[in-house]
Amino acid sequence: MVALFPITIAEMGIDDIDGVQAVERASFPVPWPANAFRHELTQNRNAHYIVAREGDRVVGYAGLWLSLDEAHITTFAVLPEHRRRKIGERMLLDLFDRAERLGAEWLTLEVRASNLPAQRLYEKYGFRPAGIRRRYYSDNNEDAIIMWTDRLRDPALRERIAKLRASIEERG
């Protein structure tokens, strides 16, 4: 029997980069290099990154950039063997909280047109398709779907997020 540790969500630090790189390599055909994360953490004052840990192991991570009144989710991944355990949802809730604390009015992101599971997750949390970036992904020229939320202070969105949060907390 394998022991499972609780998942914790925390700010990403320099010491997390090796673990983040393992998630990157397992998740994307063209992973970001370690120096890109190092730069984001040390030089980009608009960047905010988190990690999901099981014990000491990084099993997921996500990041956003704050640009005026918009929070742009730049990257988001969970190790394939840890997917479908609500880790992505917990990270997404954390990003909603961070965006709101930072004063963002909206959340936005791009997602591969072929990544239907990610699109369903984002739609569950109130993101809606708003456009397409043609040939956005350099590895295969796949289109990206641009998705946006309603205003983060919108009562309907807040109620949706509160219900989803309660559902996840109730499951442990």
Image: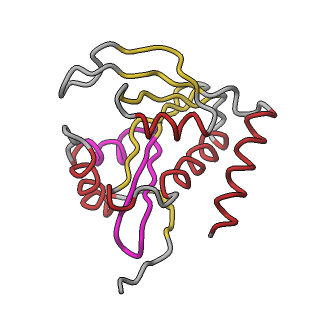
Is residue 72 depicted above or below 43 in this figure? above
Q: Which quarter shows the N terminus?
A: bottom left
Residue lying at the far bottom of the rendered structure: 1
Magenta span of residues:
36-63
The image shows residue 20, relative to residue 112, as above or below, that is below
Taking the spot 51% from the left edge, 61% from the top edge, the residue there is 9
How has the structure been colored for display?
secondary structure
Image coordinates for residue 123, horizontal then vertical, percent: 57, 33
- Residue visible at 41% across and 56% down in the picture: 83
Q: Position of residue 13 (x, y in %)?
A: 38, 59
- Residue 134: within the magenta? no
Between 145 and 20, which is closer to the camera in this rendering? 145
Horizontal relation, residue 119 to residue 75: left or right: right
As displayed, is residue 71 above or below residue 26? Answer: above
Quadrant position of residue 126: top right
Direction from residue 76 to residue 96 in the image, left or right: right
Q: Which residue is drawn at 42% across and 34% down?
A: 116
Which percent across, then down, holds residue 164?
68, 50
Furthest toward the right, the residue is 155
Q: Is residue 60 left or right of residue 122?
A: left
In depth, the one of 164 and 74 nearer the eye is 164
User: For the C terminus, which image quadrant?
Assistant: bottom right
**Residue 143 drawn at (x, y percent):** 32, 19
11 and 147: which is toward the camera? 147
Count of marks overlaid on the render: 0
Would you say residue 43 sits in the magenta stretch? Answer: yes
The residue under the point 43% across, 22% down is 145
